[in-house]
Image (cartoon, rainbow, N blue to C red):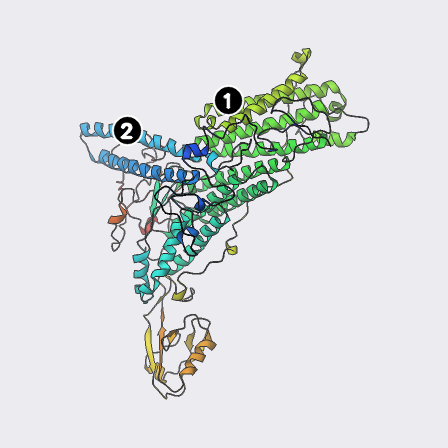
Amino acid sequence: MPTWTSPGPVEGPRFGAGRLLPALPGVWPGGARGSGGGSAGSGSAEQRSGGGEDTAGPEMTETLPPRGCPAAEPAEDGYFRKGCNPLAETGRSKLQNQRAVLNQQILRAVRMRAGAENLLRATTNNKVREQVLLELSFVNSDLQILKEELEGLNISVEVYQNAEETFSIPLVPLGLKETKEVDFTLPLKDFILEHYSEDSSEYEDEIADLMDLRQACRTPSRDEAGIEMLISYFLQLGYVENRFFPPTRHMGVLFTWYDSFTGVPVCQQNLLLEKASILFNIGALYTQIGTRCNRQTQAGLENAVDAFQKAAGVLSYLKETFTHTPSYDMSPAMLNVLVKMMLAQAQECVFEQIGLSGIRNEFFTLVKMTQEVAKVGEVYMLVNTAMNQEPVKENIPYSWSKLAQIKSDHYKALAHYFTATILCDHELQPGDDEDQQEKALSQLYDHMPEGLVALAVLKDKVRRKQLGKAHLRQAVVYHEEALRVCGLCKKLRNIDVLQEVLTAAHKRSLLKYAQQETEDDFLSLIQAPDILPKTEHKIETIAPQFSKVKVKDFFHKLGPLTVFSAKQRWTAPRTIRIPQGAGELGFHLKGGSPVQIYCLDPVCPAASMGLKEGDYIVSVGGVDCKWLGVNEVLEKLRSVGEQALEIKVISCQDTAASLHSKSATYSVGMQKTYSLICLAMDEDKIDQTKKAPLKLPFLSWGSKNRQKAASTLCLPSAVAGSSQTKKKLLPFTLLNTESSLY
C-alpha cells in the first residue's frame, strides 16, 4: 500500500481510497513536529524555569545541582537514593519550589485576613471599621492575584511533557501537594517510654529512618521508583498509626499540607490527613509519568494510558476511603472531576495509539476512527460539564475547564471531518458490499437527517456530497469555537503548540470544504446529524496494588502488632524469678508470638512471684522473645536447666473506649464550608502538654450563617455592617475531639 506524505499540515493533493490520510497534528502523532513549529508555550521550558526537565533517560537526581551545592553521593544508604535532589535545577523542581513560595505567601495573606476579620467583628468604632474594610479589600486583591499565579503553575503543562518535540495537544498533570517538615523524635520517644516501657534511645535510628523517608517523599522521582517510595511510606504510616496513635488522644504531631489548587494550608494532628495527602501525591505522580511518556511511540502511548488509568484508580480509592477530607483538592466532588479528567486523557491516548501508524483513507477504517474520536470528544465534554458545577467551579483552574472545552470541540470537529471524508471520497462501487456499508453508515448516527436513508445516500452522489459538506461545515464551526475559546484564555493562548494544532486542523477542514464547493451550495439546507461515540477500548480505573510493594515495619522490635499496638494497654514488664531447683514450672504456654501463660498452678513458685493466667512472656533470661513461638520459648526455658530462671511478663488491661471521630469539614451541598485549622499558629509555640480546648475551628461555617461567611477561597470583599455573628470564630483553635478529621 503506497504511503501519502504531505509537505505540510494543510497542502497536498486530494487523496483517493486505499491511501493514507495525511498526518494531522494533534490527532495522531505520526511524527515529530516540523521545522516551522516552535516549542510549547512562550519559550522553552528551560528558558522559563531556568533548567531542563528530567527526560526519559537520566533521573532528576543526576541533574547538576546549583553552583556551590555538593552533588549527591551514590552511596547505598544515601538520602538522594530515596528521593530527588531538591536542589537540582530542573523545570519540575523549580515549579514545585515556586508552588511552595506561593503557599507561604497565601498563608501570610490568610493570616492577615483572619486578624482583620476578627477586628472587624470586635470593634464598634466606625473609623476603625472603615480602615479595616480598606485593608481587607487590599488583602482580598492580593489573595486573588496569588490564586491566579498558582493557577498559572497548574497550567504549566509544557514542563511536564516529554522532551521530544511533538505536535500534539498537551496533557494536564497534577502538581504535588506541598507539606512542612515534621519532627517525630520527641513524641515517638515519649510514647515508647510511656506506653511500651522500653528505652526510647534504642529506637532513634528507626525514627530517623521514618523522618528520612517522609522527607524523601516530598521530592519523589518521576518514575516507578518514585511511586514505590510513596507507596512504601503510605504503608509505613499504617504501622505508625497502629503503633503510636491511640484513638483516645492526640500525639501532638502537627501535619500541615497545602491545597494543590488554592494554596491554603490545612493543619491537623490526625495521621489520616498525612495518609490522604500521600495518596493524592501518588495519583499526581502517576499523571506526571503519563504526561512524560513519549507519545510518538506505541510503547510510550501504552505507558501513558496505563499511568492515567492508575492515577484515576488512586484518586478514586482516595475518594472512597477518605470521605471527609478537609481541603478542596481532596473533596469528593473535586476528586470525581479529577478521575474523569484522567480517564479522558487515557481515552485521548488510546485514539492516538490507534492512529499512530497513520489512518488509511478506507471506508470501514474511517468509520471506526470517526466513532473513536467522537468518544474522546464526548468524555471531554463530560469533564467540562463537571468542572463547571458547584462547588468545583470556584476552585478548579479556569484554564483546565477551557482546555477540556477546547479538546471536546476539537475532537468533535475531527469526527465530522472523518465522516465528511467517508461521504466525499468514497463512492459505492459495483463490487462493494452494500449491506455492510449501509450498516456501518447507519451506526454513525442516532437517526439520519429527515428524508435521507443510508442506502440511498450511498448510491446518490449528490446526496452524499450534500451530507458530506454539511459535516464539513459543522467541523469548521467546532474548529472556530475551539480557536475562539483558546484565544480568550490568557494561559492557553501562550501555549504555542496548542495554537498550532488547532490552526492546522481548522485550515485542513477549510481546504476540504473548498474542494467540494459548487455554485448551487445555497440550495443545500441539510444539517449534519450528531455522531454516535463508540470505542472498542474501554477505559477503566486501575485500583492501586499496594500489596506489590513489600515494606518492613520500622518498629518491628516493639513486637507483634496484634498485641503491641497503641490500642492495647498492659502493665509494665514484671520480672518473675523462679528459684533454682524448683522442678516443674507449673504452667503451660499457648498462642503464637508472643506466647501466653495458661493452666497456671496457683501454688507453683512462679505464681507466688506474681505470674498470672494470660500473661505474655516478653523475655527469657534477658533475651527478647516477643517474636518467638511456643517451641522456641520452651527451648530457651529448657536451656536454663537447674539454674535460677528469670522471665519478664506483661498483663493486658481493658482497652479504653475508642474516641468517636466526627467530621463535618466538607459538604458538597455547602460550597462555602471549609475547615482550616491553626491558620495563625506558629508550630514552634505549640504546647505539646496541653490538651486541645473545645472550640470551633476557624473558617468552619454552618448553614445558618452561610451567606454571612467570607470564604477564603472565593475571596469576596468584606461587607460593612456584618460584624455581628451568632458564634465567635477564633483563628487560634487547636483540633479538638469533636472536630477531628475523619
Give the quadrant of residue 98.
Answer: top left
Residue drawn at (49%, 36%) of the image: 172
The amino acid pointed to by label 2 is Phe
Residue 414: percent from left, percent from top: 61, 27
**Quarter that holds the N terminus:** top right
Instruction: Check contact, mark 2 vs mark 1: CB within 8 A.
Output: no
Q: Residues within 10 Å of mark 2 (few under 14, many from 20)?
A: some
Q: Which of marks 1 and 2 precedes in the sequence? A: 2
Query: What is the CA distance from the residue labelled 2 to the residue labelled 1?
Result: 33 Å
Residue 652: percent from left, percent from top: 37, 69
Camera-nearest residue between 308 and 314 = 308
Residue 48: percent from left, percent from top: 42, 32
Q: Residues within 10 Å of mark 1 (few under 14, many from 20)?
A: few
Q: Residue furthest right?
A: 430
Figure label count: 2
Question: Which secondary structure lies at badge 2?
Answer: helix
- The mark found on residue 484 in the picture is 1
Please, is residue 400 above or below residue 304 in the view?
A: above
User: Does residue 371 appear in this view?
Assistant: yes
The amino acid pointed to by label 1 is Arg
Please, is residue 137 above or below residue 346 in the view?
A: above
Residue 279: percent from left, percent from top: 45, 48
Q: Which residue is mark 2?
A: 138
Camera-nearest residue between 727 and 593 = 593
Camera-nearest residue between 734 and 679 = 679
Camera-nearest residue between 49 and 704 = 49
Please, is residue 333 above or below residue 415 in the view?
A: below
User: Does residue 527 appear in this view?
Assistant: no
Question: Which secondary structure lies at badge 1?
Answer: helix
With 560 as the anchor, is 308 left or right in this view? right
Give the quadrant of residue 622.
Answer: bottom left
Residue drawn at (38%, 40%) of the image: 259
